Image (tube, rainbow, N blue to C red):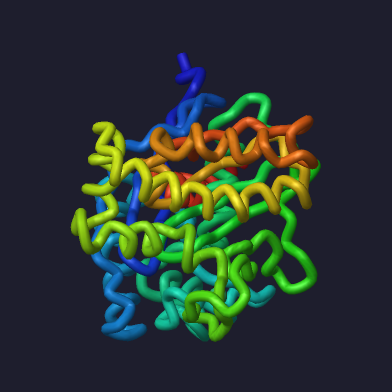
């Protein structure tokens, strides 16, 4: 008797400014994608394009060989803006990716078709794959090295005229403020990304993780720093909700691990915004946490979305 729900396995990668994450993801029948295995390596973009490419090829090759050597496609989420030809046009936080035809390189070296997508779009796709019914109007915000974003309206990813829609990290929230890698000052990601939280944490706590842990434990000074940081996250999020009226806002990226310490502050900021108060969306941590981008890439490559 044939298996009524054959299991498919797909590999997805998330290529970010801090690390490259590879996940083997399985789905049985119409069930939820399930992470079988995850493995990561530092991306070290300062070491250049060739090094980063070796890291990506090494991880993808190893995980694929172990979990789905016969798969024909590989999903790759990248921290950058993809042109319609699949070339990375702009990647402020991972300049080593710019101009790289990553899909062709991976296809040539691994013998598979590589399907590329913006990393925050992959987080949105993971959310769609993990929910039934999938939300039709969704905003995903990823807080990592920088801030990424994705917008799903009426069930479709919004791409814009050049493929860059839904990227809120370089919205200016403080004119004349902190200089940004993009050349402007006061971009949202200078105040509300994982890097920004790490900067707040550096003097007294060493790392963002230790600061979050202290805040979780109720230490007043840590709580105040996290609350101040959360106000910056809420400022941009509130603007996005005002503009787009989503039913769900998903918080992804490395800082999705800190969702519990920020959720209250984010919700009250949205409730205090008079033009958003009567339509506050559901606020959720991305499914699969920091692995959401890789899971979304795997789901895209496998055709689960
Ligand atoms: Zn910027």
Say which of 252 and 127 sits in front: 252
Q: Quadrant of residue 44?
A: bottom left
Q: How many marks?
A: 0
Q: Quadrant of residue 292?
A: top left
Say which of 246 and 123 sits in front: 246
Instruction: State whether residue 171 is above or below residue 45.
Output: above
Q: Is residue 156 left or right of residue 83?
A: right
Q: Is residue 154 left or right of residue 259?
A: right
Instruction: State whether residue 195 is above or below residue 101.
Output: above
Residue depicted at 61% across the width and 66% down the height = 173
Task: Find residue 46 and report its horizontal and vertical position in percent.
Answer: 30, 82
Ligand 1 lies in quarter: bottom right
Residue depicted at 51% across the width and 61% down the height = 147
Q: Is residue 60 visible?
A: no
Task: Find residue 304 and report its horizontal and vertical position in percent.
Answer: 58, 40
Instruction: State whether residue 197 is above or below residue 261.
Output: below
Q: Is residue 291 left or right of residue 122?
A: left
Q: Is residue 167 visible?
A: yes
Residue depicted at 29% across the width and 34% down the height = 216
Task: Find residue 50 and report its horizontal and vertical position in percent.
Answer: 32, 84
Residue depicted at 29% across the width and 45% down the height = 222
Say which of 155 and 225 sits in front: 225
Task: Find residue 285 and report its horizontal and vertical position in percent.
Answer: 48, 37
Where the C terminus falls, by quadrant? top right
């Amino acid at each position: 008797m044939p298996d009524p729900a054959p299991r498919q396995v797909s590999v997805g990668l998330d290529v970010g400014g801090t690390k490259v994450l590879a996940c083997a993801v399985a789905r049985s029948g119409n069930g939820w994608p399930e992470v079988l295995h995850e493995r990561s390596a530092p991306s070290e973009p300062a070491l250049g394009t060739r090094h980063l490419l070796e890291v990506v090829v090494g991880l993808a090759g190893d995980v694929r060989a172990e979990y789905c050597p016969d798969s024909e496609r590989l999903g790759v989420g990248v921290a950058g803006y993809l042109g319609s030809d699949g070339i990375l046009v702009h990647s402020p936080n991972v300049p080593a990716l710019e101009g790289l035809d990553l899909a062709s390189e991976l296809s040539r070296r691994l013998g598979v078709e590589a399907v590329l997508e913006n990393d925050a779009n992959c987080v949105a796709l993971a959310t769609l794959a993990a929910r039934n019914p999938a939300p039709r109007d969704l905003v995903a915000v990823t807080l990592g090295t920088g801030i990424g974003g994705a917008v799903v309206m009426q069930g479709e990813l919004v791409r814009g005229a050049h493929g860059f829609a839904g990227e809120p990290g370089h919205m200016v929230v403080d004119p004349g403020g902190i200089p940004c890698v993009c050349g402007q000052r006061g971009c949202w990601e200078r105040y509300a990304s994982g890097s920004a939280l790490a900067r707040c944490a550096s003097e007294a706590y060493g790392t963002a993780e230790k600061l979050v842990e202290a805040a979780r434990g109720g230490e007043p000074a840590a709580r105040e720093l996290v609350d101040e940081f959360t106000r910056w996250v809420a400022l941009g999020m509130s603007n996005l909700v005002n503009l787009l009226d989503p039913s769900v806002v998903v918080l992804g990226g490395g800082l999705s691990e800190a969702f519990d310490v920020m959720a209250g502050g984010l919700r009250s900021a949205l409730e205090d915004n008079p033009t958003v108060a009567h339509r506050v969306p559901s606020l959720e941590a991305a499914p699969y946490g920091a692995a959401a981008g890789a899971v979304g890439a795997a789901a895209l490559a496998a055709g689960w979305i």
